Image (cartoon, rainbow, N blue to C red):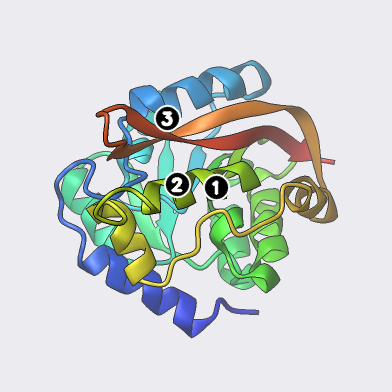
């Protein structure tokens, strides 16, 4: 099974038109607001001597943070343009590869090369095409092996209402959100109950979970930071 060409092209065009400036993408929050608190939740369950794979790494902002805390960090993304952003920003740190998480053979090859690994996946399932959500979760399971632990965080349905409110701002959606819509990306597209179901179907056990919010780089008209309601899961192979 492979990801739809429409979906791949949407991400490719989005990242081609995104600059190297930090925060140009709406979700490109500083790691202090993202990977750092997430790692605090993962660390009690994980062997940090194992490598970590950042699935859907984008321009590598979070991967660079993870690389400083694990012996080896690998960022993968569907978009070649995203991978090139990441490599420019991090020429001597983590490694970055273009990879479709629905390409089971390519995922298995990466799993063979790394051995058991930890996984960090921020907001990938909710905006994947419906048919791709289980294969994405299966990619997490394949990479974890027996000893790895995964941190998965996904937007909840409530965040769709927040984005709708932001889009209805005076003057229309702010620029960073407008670009998401213009490229045909669909945030918060999965139902809340679907994420834990998909994880379970992929052979993953939820060790811990809880509510959170994903910080964005866009602001409300009053200048406060936009945060999108989300839920996090620490998982292992069942």
- Percent coordinates x, y for residue 197 in the rendering: 82, 51
- Percent coordinates x, y for residue 144 in the rendering: 66, 43
Q: Does residue 214 appear left or right of residue 12 in this picture?
A: right
> Any mark on residue 82, and which?
none
Q: Secondary structure at mark 1?
A: helix
52, above or below 135, in the image: above
> Any mark on residue 165, and which?
2
142, above or below 196, in the image: below
134, above or below 170, in the image: below
Nearest the eye: 76 or 173: 173
Do callouts 2 and 1 mark residues in contact (Cβ within 8 Å)? yes
Q: How many marks?
A: 3
Q: Does residue 207 appear left or right of residue 31 in this picture?
A: right
* Residue visible at 46% across and 82% down in the picture: 6
The residue at which mark 3 appears reads as: 34
Q: Secondary structure at mark 3?
A: loop
- Badge 3 or badge 1: first in the primary sequence: 3
Q: Does residue 183 appear left or right of residue 142 in this picture?
A: left
* Label 2, label 3: how far apart the Cα atoms are: 23 Å
Q: Does residue 114 appear left or right of residue 208 in this picture?
A: left
- Badge 2 or badge 3: first in the primary sequence: 3
The residue at which mark 1 appears reads as: 161
Mark closer to the observer (3, 1)? 1
Q: Secondary structure at mark 2?
A: helix
Quarter of the picture containing the N terminus is bottom right
Mark closer to the observer (2, 3)? 2
- Percent coordinates x, y for residue 135 in the rendering: 69, 65
* Residue visible at 45% across and 46% down in the picture: 165
């Amino acid at each position: 099974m492979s990801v739809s060409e429409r979906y791949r092209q949407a991400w490719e065009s989005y990242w081609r038109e995104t600059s190297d400036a930090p925060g140009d993408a709406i979700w490109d929050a500083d790691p202090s607001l993202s990977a750092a608190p997430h790692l605090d939740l993962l660390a009690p369950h994980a062997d940090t001597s194992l490598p970590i794979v950042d699935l859907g790494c984008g321009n590598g902002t979070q991967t660079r943070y993870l690389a400083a805390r694990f012996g080896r960090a690998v960022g993968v993304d569907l978009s070649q343009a995203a991978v090139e952003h990441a490599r420019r920003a991090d020429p001597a740190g983590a490694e970055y590869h273009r990879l479709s998480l629905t390409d089971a053979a390519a995922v298995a090859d990466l799993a063979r090369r790394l051995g058991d690994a930890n996984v960090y996946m921020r907001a990938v399932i909710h905006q994947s095409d419906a048919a791709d959500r289980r294969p994405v979760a299966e990619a997490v399971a394949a990479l974890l092996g027996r000893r790895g632990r995964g941190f998965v965080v996904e937007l909840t349905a409530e965040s769709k209402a927040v984005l709708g409110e932001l889009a209805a701002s005076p003057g229309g959606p702010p620029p960073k959100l407008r670009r998401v819509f213009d490229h045909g990306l669909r945030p918060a597209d999965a139902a809340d109950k679907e994420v834990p179901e998909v994880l379970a179907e992929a052979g993953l056990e939820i060790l811990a979970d809880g509510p959170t919010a994903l910080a964005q780089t866009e602001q409300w008209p009053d200048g406060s930071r936009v945060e999108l309601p989300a839920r996090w899961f620490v998982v292992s192979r069942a």
